[in-house]
Structure formats: C-alpha cells, structure tokens
Image: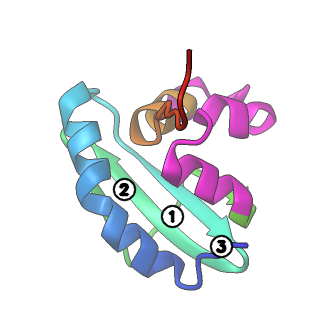
Amino acid sequence: MVQVLNLASCFEHLLPELERRWHLTGLPVRMNIGLEVAGQQVLLQLAPGAVGLAEDGAADVGLSLTQSELLALALGLHSSSYVLHQRLQRCPQVAAALAVLFPEQLSVSGVWG
C-alpha cells in the first residue's frame, strides 16, 4: 500500500501542477480549503489565477480524506465528485474547485482490440 508520510511535502511537490491547472481556468474564486489526511493538515489558498499553501489561517471549508482518497485524487484515478460525492453535495463552489485541481486522468494499458 502506498502512503503519504508528509502531507505538506506532498502538496509542495503537487503545487506547480495545481497552479497550472487553476491558472488555466481563470475562475474568480477565492477560498481556503483545509485538507486533513491521517492526522496531518494542509491549507490550500485559492485566489483568481493563483494557488498556494498557507502556514496558518482559517479554512473556509475542511475535508478529511483517507490515504486512498488522497491518492485517487492526486493520481487522477477518479474524479473528485466520485471520491468525495457525499461531502461535496452542499458545496458546489468547492466541488468545482476540486474538479479543476484534481481532474480524472483516464488511462489505459495493455493491448486492446
């Protein structure tokens, strides 16, 4: 089983790709999303055209994820709406932001046909 041992370091490495995805959308959204995984926390700061990690501050919304959910999002194995369906039903703005940051990346392997 794969585990993220240092959540902050993981997101520091993901940040360039998250920034690229966020910048391309041009969404005029400003919010802080707190993510908690296995007792570790990060705070994603979203602003128009920018994504960052905050050292401190308050989260507008907080999400607790399992290791499996985090990896499914980070690797694009499933869409954020699939992984977090029950938790995002009442938060359409957060759902849209996470869909941009963590899109499903369809992949295939093997010989088909």
Nearest to viewer (mark 1 / mark 3) = 3
Q: Please state which amino acid type lies under the numbered disc 2.
A: Gln
Q: Is residue 92 above or below residue 102?
A: above
The residue at which mark 3 appears reads as 2
The residue at which mark 1 appears reads as 58
- Kindly indicate the quadrant of the structure image that contains residue 57: bottom left
Question: Real-space Cα distance between discs 2 and 1?
Answer: 10 Å
Q: Earlier in the sequence, mark 1 or mark 3?
A: 3
Q: Nearer the viewer, residue 25 or 17?
A: 17
Residue 44 is one of the magenta-drawn residues: no
Q: Please state which amino acid type lies under the numbered disc 3.
A: Val
Q: Earlier in the sequence, mark 3 or mark 2?
A: 3
Q: Main secondary structure of the magenta part?
A: helix
Q: Position of residue 71 (x, y in %)?
A: 60, 58
Residue drawn at x 33%, y 70% as measured from the top left: 13
Task: Kindly state the secondary structure of the residue where label 3 is placed.
Answer: loop
Q: Position of residue 76 (x, y in %)?
A: 51, 42
Q: Does residue 105 appear anywhere in the picture?
A: yes
Q: Nearer the viewer, residue 3 or 10?
A: 3
Q: Residues within 10 Å of mark 2 (few under 14, many from 20)?
A: some
Q: Quadrant of the C terminus?
A: top right
Residue drawn at x 18%, y 40% as measured from the top left: 49
Question: Real-space Cα distance between discs 1 and 3?
Answer: 30 Å
74 left or right, relative to 18: right
The residue at which mark 2 appears reads as 45
Q: Which residues are magenta?
A: 68-94
